[in-house]
């Protein structure tokens, strides 16, 4: 009977320890280079850091910055479904939720930061809807 009690206690301890280790992971996030749409010189269709490489199981912060004068609708549906979002930050305001967004939209220049843990390896496409033919596309690769 003592062995069963010890096994139960050990299992309970591991169960309660798991969430604490997950929280530690988000505190050790790596800041990625900004993904920049457009520039201040008037070229609305250039992209800086359009291809990004990540490792599964690691936490990251990615700032998506709109500098052009276009309306940018940032879509990355498969990527968004295969990461765990910690938060989305817009002007020092945080959005927390249980599921991925459909897309991120910039009506004016500004930035949106996403903090996440890369979960599933794969190569995911991102694009600015309606501006793909002008070069506003890229990939996010998770190894």
Image (spheres, rainbow, N blue to C red):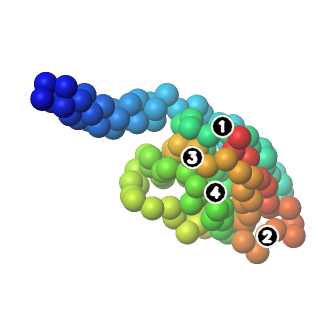
**Picture layout, residue 27 above or below residue 67:** above
Residue at (55%, 51%) from the top-left corner? 83
- Are the residues tagged 3 and 1 within 8 Å (C-beta)? no
- Are the residues tagged 2 and 1 within 8 Å (C-beta)? no
Q: Secondary structure at mark 1?
A: loop
Q: Secondary structure at mark 4?
A: helix
**Residues packed near mark 3 inside 10 Å, few (<14), some (14 to 19) or many (20 plus):** some
Question: Which numbered dot is residue 55?
Answer: 1
Residue at (87%, 70%) from the top-left corner? 133
Q: CA distance from mark 3 to mark 1?
A: 9 Å
Residue denoted by label 4: 79
Q: Earlier in the sequence, mark 4 or mark 3?
A: 4
Residue denoted by label 3: 119
Question: Residue 35, image x and y in percent?
Answer: 70, 47
Question: Residue 94, image x and y in percent?
Answer: 40, 50
In the rendered image, which quarter is residue 118 located in?
A: top right
Q: Secondary structure at mark 2?
A: loop
The answer to whether residue 140 is seen in the rendering is: no
**Which numbered disc, 2 or 1, marks the residue closer to the eye?**
1
């Amino acid at each position: 009977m003592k062995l069963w009690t010890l096994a139960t206690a050990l299992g309970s301890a591991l169960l309660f320890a798991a969430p604490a280790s997950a929280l530690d992971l988000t505190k050790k996030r790596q800041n990625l280079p900004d993904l920049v749409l457009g520039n201040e010189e008037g070229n609305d269709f250039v992209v800086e850091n359009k291809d990004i490489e990540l490792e599964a199981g690691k936490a990251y912060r990615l700032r998506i910055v709109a500098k052009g004068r276009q309306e940018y609708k940032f879509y990355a549906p498969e990527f968004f479904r295969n990461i765990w979002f910690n938060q989305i930050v817009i002007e020092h305001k945080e959005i927390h939720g249980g599921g991925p967004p459909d897309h991120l939209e910039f009506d004016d220049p500004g930035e949106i930061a996403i903090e996440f843990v890369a979960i599933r390896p794969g190569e995911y496409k991102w694009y600015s809807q309606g501006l793909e033919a002008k070069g506003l596309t890229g990939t996010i690769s998770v190894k």
